[in-house]
Image (cartoon, grey):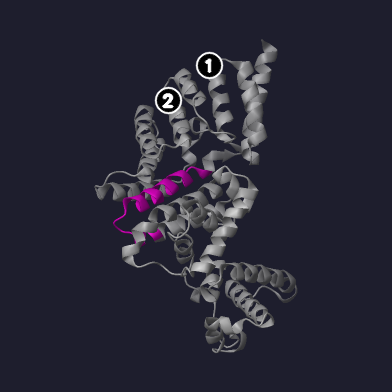
């Protein structure tokens, strides 16, 4: 709905305000009058009308000629035949607008997560490992620049697509990551957008790699959280995996590899996820792929995941040494990973301290339940000793 309003109004902040007003009116009217036959169309129309009313009150319509021209079709669109099926897919256009090269990369990703993913400023800040206030300033600057430079709400020309692909892929993957841990609807939306992007960029292996990665991860959703707690990969019931998504993910990965270009970060991650979907995981191969990925990205989070793979391949002591060399600040998966390695190495007291630290950083209830269970097990072991 927000994407549709941005397309109609041509103003990011005005569209956000209009969307908010539309939801307020829906909350007031729908319980009384019933949900309309085309709720999305109702919200878009109501939001548009609220925006036009606001502009009229502020006497700025002469500077908004596009709104005036649209309004000539009928007062407040009352005569327009609009239902949910006639509202096009503006989400991909919104992503490309937010990922305009005039904006800094972090601003591109953050702005799209706010507009399209519906994430709070605090949630986006956590994704970027920065404070809420810092992220608030970044978002404000990005919106101001969109308005000042008149960045268009549209898919760019084919020749300009490559300049924005990396940011668009990053946006979709971050939306998926947020949804994977907390909101199913966001994960499903990210996968849908991934399919659209792969259809648009038929010769881009990274688009297929990202789609494969999301499908393969999402195939494990039912096995990942059971009875309200996170289940580690090694303990998951593989009969709960969604085989249709595994097959679709493998097909997308095969398509990426068939293009015979150098494997990028999403293709490498998808290859790792495909190995992890096997009944017997070749952890040595997973380690090798993570090494290539770390060389390519230089990411400390990738280095953390490589250390986990090293532990699964049979060397937890080396994995712990790799982790202790990382600088990840308050990244919430660092202490939990370190705690698990210490537990495996029999260093119970240190493991207990690390699990307690991890509990203070956990952001979801399934993670907290998993960590609390591990911690309780360590305390029982200490008592028995």
Place of residue 225 in the rendered image (x, y in percent of width and height, measured from the top left): 57, 40
Residue 181 seen in render: no
User: Quadrant of the rendered structure where residue 299 is?
Assistant: top left
How packed is label 1: few (under 14 Cα within 10 Å), some, or many (20 or more)?
Answer: some
**Which mark identifies residue 8?**
none
Q: In the rendered view, does 208 fall on the left or right side of 65?
A: left
Outermost residue toward the front in this view: 148
- Answer with left or right where residue 15 lies relative to residue 252: right
Which residue is drawn at the image coordinates 61% and 85% (left, top)? 76
Element on which disc 2 rests: helix
Question: Magenta stretch containing residue 214, yes or no?
Answer: yes
Q: CA distance from mark 1 to mark 2?
A: 14 Å
Prevailing secondary structure class for the magenta stretch in the rendered image:
helix
Residue at 64% across, 41% down: 363
Residue 114: where, in percent of width, then height?
A: 57, 57
Task: Pick out the residue farthest to the top.
Answer: 385
- In the rendered image, the vertical position of residue 196 relative to residue 318, given as above or below: below
Query: Which residue lies at the image location 44% right of the left edge and 35% below the top edge?
Result: 302
State the mark number for residue 345.
Answer: 1
Is residue 218 depicted above or below 38 in this figure? above
Q: Is residue 127 above or below residue 97?
A: above
Q: Is residue 343 above or below residue 155?
A: above
The magenta-colored residue range is 197-221
Which residue in the protein does label 2 denote? 310
């Amino acid at each position: 709905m927000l994407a549709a309003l941005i397309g109609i109004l041509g103003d990011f902040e005005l569209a956000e305000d209009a969307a908010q007003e539309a939801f307020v009116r829906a909350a007031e009217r729908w319980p009384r009058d019933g949900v309309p036959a085309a709720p999305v169309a109702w919200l878009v129309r109501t939001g548009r009308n609220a925006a036009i009313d606001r502009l009229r009150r502020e006497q700025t319509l002469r500077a908004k000629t596009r709104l005036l021209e649209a309004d000539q079709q009928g007062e407040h669109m009352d005569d327009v035949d609009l239902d949910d099926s006639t509202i096009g897919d503006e989400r991909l256009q919104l992503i490309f607008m937010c990922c305009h090269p005039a904006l800094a990369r972090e601003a591109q990703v953050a702005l799209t997560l706010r507009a399209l993913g519906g994430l709070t400023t605090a949630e986006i800040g956590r994704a970027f490992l920065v404070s809420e206030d810092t992220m608030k300033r970044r978002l404000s600057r990005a919106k101001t620049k969109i308005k000042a430079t008149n960045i268009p709400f549209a898919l760019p020309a084919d020749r300009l697509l490559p300049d924005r692909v990396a940011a668009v892929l990053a946006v979709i993957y971050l939306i998926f990551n947020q949804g994977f841990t907390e909101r199913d609807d966001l994960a499903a939306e990210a996968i849908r957008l991934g399919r659209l992007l792969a259809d648009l960029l038929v010769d881009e292996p990274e688009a297929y790699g990202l789609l494969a990665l999301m499908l393969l991860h999402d195939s494990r959703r039912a096995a990942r959280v059971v009875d309200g707690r996170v289940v580690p990969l090694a303990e998951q019931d593989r009969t709960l995996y969604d085989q249709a998504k595994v097959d679709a993910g493998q097909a997308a990965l095969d398509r990426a590899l068939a293009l015979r270009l150098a494997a990028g970060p999403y293709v490498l991650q998808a290859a790792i996820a495909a190995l992890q979907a096997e009944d017997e995981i070749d952890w040595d191969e997973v380690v090798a792929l993570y090494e290539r990925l770390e060389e390519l990205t230089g990411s400390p989070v990738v280095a953390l995941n490589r250390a986990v793979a090293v532990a699964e391949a049979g060397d937890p002591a080396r994995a712990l040494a790799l982790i202790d060399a990382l600088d990840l600040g308050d990244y919430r998966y660092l202490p939990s990973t370190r705690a698990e390695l210490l537990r495996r190495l029999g260093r119970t007291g240190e493991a207990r301290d690390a699990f307690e630290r991890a509990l203070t950083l956990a952001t979801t209830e399934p993670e907290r339940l998993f960590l609390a269970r591990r911690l309780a097990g360590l305390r029982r072991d200490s008592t028995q000793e």
